[in-house]
Amino acid sequence: MWLAAPTDLKLLPYDVHIWRIDLERPEPELQALEATLSSDEIARARRFYFQQHQQRFIAGRGILRAILGRYLGVEPQAVRFEYEPRGKPILGDTYIHSGLSFNLSHSQDLAVCAVSINRVIGVDIEYIRSVSDVEALAKRFFSPREYAVVRSLPPQQQQKVFFRYWTCKEAYLKATGVGLVQLEQVEISLTPEEPAKLTTDEQWSLIELLPADNYVGAVAVEGFELDLKCWQY
């Protein structure tokens, strides 16, 4: 599923490109990636208490710049970002008119970047970890129908389904720039055997991802007729 990207990378109107990024990079590469970051990104990295979290942030933002630079035909350090009111990064400066839309998500030592053109896009991944109060969280953040699905499952299935719901909701909310404040207002239809569907907005496509063992993810894209390609950075 995750292939090496071609050297002549092209993004057509129906394309959705998903990049899988290993955030554990060797020190020389981290230094090279840090050199491409802006001063505010470096300051943000320094605010992380643990060095591992600093390094993962540097890897994620540096590789994001490298990926976007390939589409824009510029060096990574030339990429400029602006931020929407709730913090979603978008391309800024002269690149705001490129039509390129992107979103980045990370969990543990893995990140995914979703890219499209002239379509709003959002992506989320989560490492499936043990959540002791999964039913209580589902009752708080999910719709009654979603909560009923989680509650009906045996414990060994509840965790994965919970995170499937979560990533699908967050991918859509990240795409729209709303944030988690409306998590319970986004309704998803899924079962352990059936893929997810977004039932609260029929103008969007929702695609679940399997980034790696013990991870789940989802990408939400405005519109339909998509050609999904998954690249390994």
Image: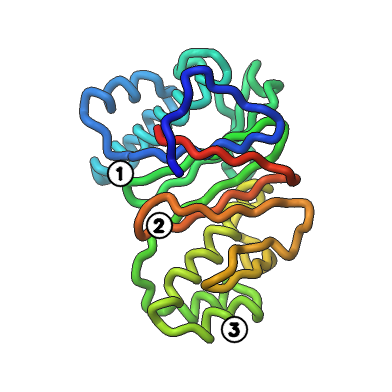
Q: What kind of element bears circle 2? A: strand
Residue found at the very far left of the displayed protein = 27
Q: Residues within 10 Å of mark 2 (few under 14, many from 20)?
A: some
Q: Can you say whether 213 is above or below 101 in the image? A: below
User: 28 and 233: which one is in front?
Assistant: 233
Q: Can you say whether 184 is above or below 38 in the image? A: below
Protein image colouring: rainbow
Q: Are marks 1 and 2 in contact (CB under 8 Å)?
A: no
Q: Quadrant of residue 81?
A: top right
Q: What kind of element bears circle 3? A: helix
Residue type marked 3: Ala
The residue to which callout 3 is attached is 148
Residue type marked 2: Tyr
Query: What separation in Å lies between label 1 and label 2 (alpha carbons)?
Result: 19 Å
Residue occupying the point 45% across, 58% down: 216
Q: Position of residue 208 (x, y in %)?
A: 55, 55
User: 49 and 148: which one is in front?
Assistant: 148
Q: Position of residue 211 (x, y in %)?
A: 42, 50
Q: Position of residue 38 (x, y in %)?
A: 44, 23
Residue occupying the point 41% across, 29% down: 63
Whichever of labels 1 and 3 marks the residue nearer the N terminus, that label is 1
Residue occupying the point 54% across, 22% down: 9
Q: Residues within 10 Å of mark 1 (few under 14, many from 20)?
A: some
The residue to which callout 2 is attached is 215
Q: Quadrant of the N terminus?
A: top left
Q: For this view, does 126 lie left or right of residue 207?
A: left
Residue type marked 1: His
The residue to which callout 1 is attached is 53
Q: What kind of element bears circle 1? A: helix
Q: Residues within 10 Å of mark 3 (few under 14, many from 20)?
A: some
